[in-house]
Image (spheres, rainbow, N blue to C red):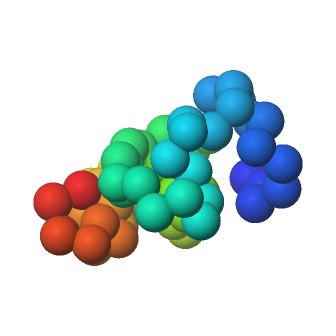
């Protein structure tokens, strides 16, 4: 289950440049069951996608400079 709750999660505590810190956006993709989704160090989580390519595109679109 995905959550916007506390900083703890499958990857452990959020990076020091997490939400509201003004740090850089570092995106990645993760999988859960049959779905892939994009995540960012700012706390943003993209929608679950069946296609990994769509999750990667979400990550690129989220990044302020468009580079993911």
**Relative height, residue 22 to residue 34 (above, below):** below
The C terminus: image quadrant: bottom left
> Measuring 55% from the left and 37% from the top, which residue is drawn there?
15
| Residue 38 sits in quarter | bottom left
**In this rendering, position of residue 58 left or right of residue 64:** right
**Relative height, residue 59 to residue 8 (above, below):** below
Q: Which sits in the foreground, 42 or 51?
A: 42
| Residue 55 sits in quarter | bottom left
Q: Which sits in the foreground, 34 or 62?
A: 62
> Measuring 17% from the left and 70% from the top, which residue is drawn there?
65
**In this rendering, position of residue 16 left or right of residue 10:** left
> Measuring 49% from the left and 40% from the top, which residue is drawn there?
30
Q: How many marks?
A: 0
**In this rendering, position of residue 18 left or right of residue 57:** right
In the image as oriented, which residue stretches furthest toward the front? Answer: 21
Picture coordinates of residue 18, whole percent (x, y)? 57, 51
Residue 26 seen in render: yes
**Relative height, residue 27 to residue 63 (above, below):** above
> Measuring 41% from the left and 44% from the top, which residue is drawn there?
29
């Amino acid at each position: 289950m995905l959550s916007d709750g506390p900083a703890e999660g499958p990857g452990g505590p959020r990076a020091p440049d997490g939400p509201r810190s003004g740090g850089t956006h570092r995106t990645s993709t993760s999988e859960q069951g049959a779905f892939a989704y994009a995540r960012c160090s700012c706390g943003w989580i993209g929608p679950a996608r069946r296609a990994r390519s769509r999750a990667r595109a979400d990550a690129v679109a989220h990044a302020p400079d468009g580079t993911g």
